[in-house]
Amino acid sequence: MAENEPCGLRGCTLFISFETDNMCRKLSRIQCDPSAVSTFELYLTLKQDHTPWHILLPQFLKNFTRGGTIMISKDFTLEKKKLYRSYQQSH
């Protein structure tokens, strides 16, 4: 998504969120190059995995996963927002 950007990946600010059944929580904001002006933003939303993965684990490993363990799904969304308009877009 940075390929056609004026500063490439250096101009990216990445926002990471985590979505559960009833809410979406912001986790982090990463500016790829703090010395560069951000020209675009990426919004990565990770989603909770609800498959009963723990059934496949041996009993001794199940003891390690109790409590606050959250599994992240392979499904996610990635959205891009440009922070500028090119000369061609403005005419």
Image: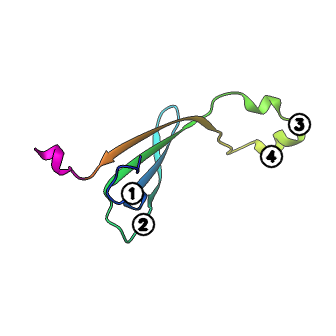
Residue that numbered label 1 is attached to: 8
Mark 3: which amino acid?
Gln
Viewer-side label of 4, 2: 2
Q: CA distance from mark 4 to mark 2?
A: 38 Å
> Of residues 64 and 11, which is closer to you in this image?
11
**From the viewer's perspective, is residue 57 above or below residue 5?**
above
- For the residue labelled by badge 3, is the local secondary structure a helix, a strand or a loop? helix
Residue neighbourhood size for the residue with mark 1, other residues' Cα within 10 Å, grouped as few (<14), some (14–19), many (≥20): some
Residue neighbourhood size for the residue with mark 2, other residues' Cα within 10 Å, grouped as few (<14), some (14–19), many (≥20): some
Residue that numbered label 2 is attached to: 33
Q: Is residue 28 left or right of residue 53?
A: left
Q: CA distance from mark 3 to mark 1?
A: 48 Å
Mark 2: which amino acid?
Asp
Viewer-side label of 1, 2: 1
| Labels 4 and 1: the sequence-earlier one | 1
Q: Which mark is residue 59?
A: 3
Residue that numbered label 4 is attached to: 64
Residue neighbourhood size for the residue with mark 3, other residues' Cα within 10 Å, grouped as few (<14), some (14–19), many (≥20): few
- For the residue labelled by badge 1, is the local secondary structure a helix, a strand or a loop? helix
Q: Is residue 22 left or right of residue 53?
A: left
- For the residue labelled by badge 2, is the local secondary structure a helix, a strand or a loop? loop
User: Residue 85: horizontal and vertical position, in percent?
Assistant: 20, 49
| Labels 1 and 2: the sequence-earlier one | 1
